[in-house]
Image (tube, grey):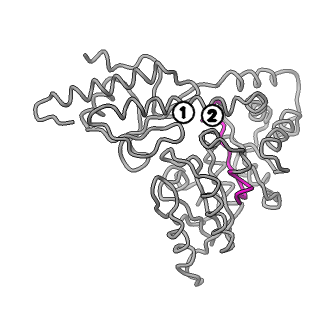
Amino acid sequence: MEADLKPTYNQFASDNYAGICPEAWGAMQEANSGFVPSYGDDLWTERACEHLRQVFETECQVFFVFNGTAANSLALASLCRSYHSVICHELAHAETDECGAPEFFSNGTKLLHVNGPDGKFDLAEVERIITRRSDIHYPRPKVLSLTQATEVGTVYTPDEIGAASELAKRHGLRVQMDGARFANAVVALNVAPAELTWRAGVDVLCLGGAKNGMAVGEAVVFFDRELAHEFDYRCKQAGQLASKMRFISAPWIGMLEGGAWLNNARHANGCAALLEQHLAAIDGIRIMYPRQANSVFVEMPEAVAAALRQAGWHFYSFIGSGGARFMCSWQTTERDVLQLSEAVRTASSAAGRAPGGTV
C-alpha cells in the first residue's frame, strides 16, 4: 500500500522546483554567442524592455534583477523614506518571507499589515490603518502593496485593484504590486495585463519570471516613469546589476514573443484546477481557499500529511494560515496530479482505518 504513496515525478512544494522551460532556455542559448556589451547596454535587454512595453501597452521603465526579494524590496525602498510605512496584507510575501529585506533596503521603513479574507485586503481596515494616526511619532503610510496572485492563490479583479488604488491615491499613497505569479492572475481573469496594473492605478509592478519557467530574473516595471529616477543606482548598490545582463533579459524575449509566459501560467492553473477537483472528492480533505491560480490549499488530518511526507512528497504547511499548499507549475503533468491525488486518497483511507482514526 505504501508504494502507492511514493512520488515518481513531480513535487508540489513550489513552482520554483520546476526547471527552465524550453522557450527561456532557447533564448539564453541564442544570446550565448559572441561578445555583447555588459550591464544591460545590449540589444537583448533593449528588446526585452520593448516587449514588456508592448505587453502593457504603455511607455513604462523596466529594470531586471535576479530575484523577487530584490524586486519587491528595492521597489518599495524607491517609493519610501526611512520614516515611512508600507501597508500590506498580513500574509504578503513582503511581510512573511523576505527576511526583513524591505526594511533593510529602505533603511527602516516599517511594514504595517492588515487582514482580509482569502488573502486580499479588507479596504475598511486599510483605511483605518492609514488614518489611525497622523502625528510625528507614527511612521507615515506611503505605499499600499498588493500581491497578485495572492499568497493563498486567489486573484484581485481589476475592479478590486481599482478600488484599492483609489483609496491609496486619495490618501497620497503609491501602489506597488508583487506580481511573482502575475501571469497566473492574467490568465485566470482573462484580461489584458494593463487592466490589472496601470489602468487600475498600479504605479510599480514586480513581475515574476522564475516561477513562470525562467531560471532567474524578475522585471521591475515602473508605470510612473518619474518614480524610476536613480533606480539603476539602487540595483547596483544592492548587487542586482548583472554584468552579463543579456542572460537575464533574453529569456523574457523567449517567454513573451510566442506567449509562453501565459501558456505556462494557463497550464499550471489548469493542473491546479484538476487537483482541486480530485482532492475535494476525498473524505476528510477540505479546500481552504477558492482555487483561482496555480495553488491548492487543503486542510487534512495530521496523520495524512505525515504519511505523505514519509513517502517523499514535498509540500509547505507554513504558507497561508495552516493547512497544506500544493503548487503546480509549467512542468506539472496530469499524471503528476493524478498520482498525488491517489496518494492523498490512500493516506486518508489508511488514517480512517487506524485505531481511533477519523476522517
Residue 340 locus on image (x, y percent): 39, 24
- Location of the C terminus by quadrant is top left
Say which of 234 and 299 sits in front. Answer: 299
- Residue in the image at 61% along x and 63% along y: 164
Is residue 210 on the magenta stretch? yes
Which comes before the other along the chain, label 1 or label 2? 1
How many residues crowd mark 2 within 10 Å: few (<14), some (14–19), many (20+)? many
Say which of 235 and 311 sits in front. Answer: 311
- Location of the N terminus by quadrant is top left
Identified by mark 2, the residue type is Asn
> In the image, is residue 279 above or below residue 49?
above
- Residue in the image at 78% along x and 61% along y: 227
Circle 2: element type: helix
The residue indicated by pointer 1 is 15
CB within 8 Å, label 1 to label 2: yes
Could you tell whether 205 is left or right of 93 in the image? right
How many residues crowd mark 1 within 10 Å: few (<14), some (14–19), many (20+)? many
Residue 101 locus on image (x, y percent): 58, 54
The residue indicated by pointer 2 is 212
Identified by mark 1, the residue type is Asp
Is residue 91 on the magenta stretch? no
Circle 1: element type: helix
Q: Which residues are magenta?
A: 196-213
Residue 170 locus on image (x, y percent): 67, 73
> In the image, is residue 223 above or below residue 15?
below
Say which of 44 and 91 sits in front. Answer: 91
Work out which residue is located at the far left of the displayed protein and give it: 355
Q: What's the CA distance linking mark 1 and mark 2?
A: 8 Å
